[in-house]
Image (cartoon, rainbow, N blue to C red):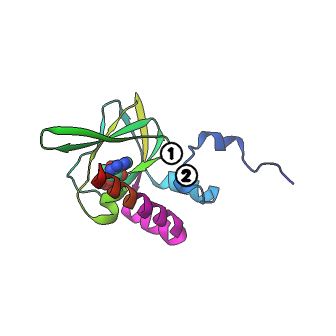
Amino acid sequence: EPISETSPQDEALPKIPLFSDLPRDAFIALFERCPLRRFPEGGRIIEQGTRGDAFYVICAGRVRIVRQSGAEQRELAQLGEGAFFGEMALLSGAPRSASVVSASEETQVLEISAPVLASLSRSYPQVAKALRRFCRQRLLSDVVN
Ligand code: CMP
């Protein structure tokens, strides 16, 4: 019995709780299908108010979620490696609810398009379920705060 089934290459793969149920092959296939985008500190990944047809998983670095209302700008959250964002516009069709800005020297995000998410969700419905749960929680927290 092997003690662990992880191979040395696994160390290079980021830990992403959203995808923890995916078999390793499906996880790697996802990385091959989706572009990895890199943003310097201050780089704007999402602009509030625009249309969104993708969501993003943080593979390295950190982001700030910033909401502009009138002249006021508020930070709603900071997210780090393994977290995701941009699911709200994708699931609801509403404009982007906030801007997302790189808060690290280099932030790397995997961009997952609507069609890729749709096919992923057919094979792994728990991914879509988790996305909907986070979307609900963030909506509620945005209303309260
Ligand atoms: P979306 O509206 O597509 O684009 C902005 C993203 O910021 C949004 O999806 C969420 O992923 C994220 N977001 C909005 N509000 C919060 C919050 N309160 N906490 C964490 N993330 C948030």
The residue carrying mark 1 is 82
Q: Which residues are magenta?
A: 111-134
Location of residue 62 with respect to 86 vertically, above or below: above
Residue 71 vs residue 54, the one in the foreground: 71
Q: Is the shortest distance between ligand 1 and the CB of mark 2 under 8 Å?
A: no
Residue marked by disc 2: 17
Question: Does dot 2 land on a helix, a strand or a loop?
Answer: helix
> Which quadrant: the N terminus?
bottom right
The verdict on residue 5 being magenta is no
* Mark 2 vs mark 1, CA separation in Å: 6 Å
- Mark 1 C-beta to ligand 1 under 8 Å: no
Q: Main secondary structure of the magenta part?
A: helix
Q: Is residue 124 left or right of residue 25?
A: left
User: Could you tell me residue 37's position as x and y percent?
Assistant: 39, 42
The quadrant where residue 79 appears? top left
Report the residue that reaches farthest toward the front.
144
Is residue 107 shown left or right of residue 25?
left
Residue drawn 24% across the image and 61% down it: 94
Q: Residues within 10 Å of mark 1 (few under 14, many from 20)?
A: some
Is disc 2 in contact with disc 1, using a CB cutoff of under 8 Å?
yes
The amino acid type found where label 2 is placed reads Pro
Q: Position of residue 27 (x, y in %)?
A: 57, 55
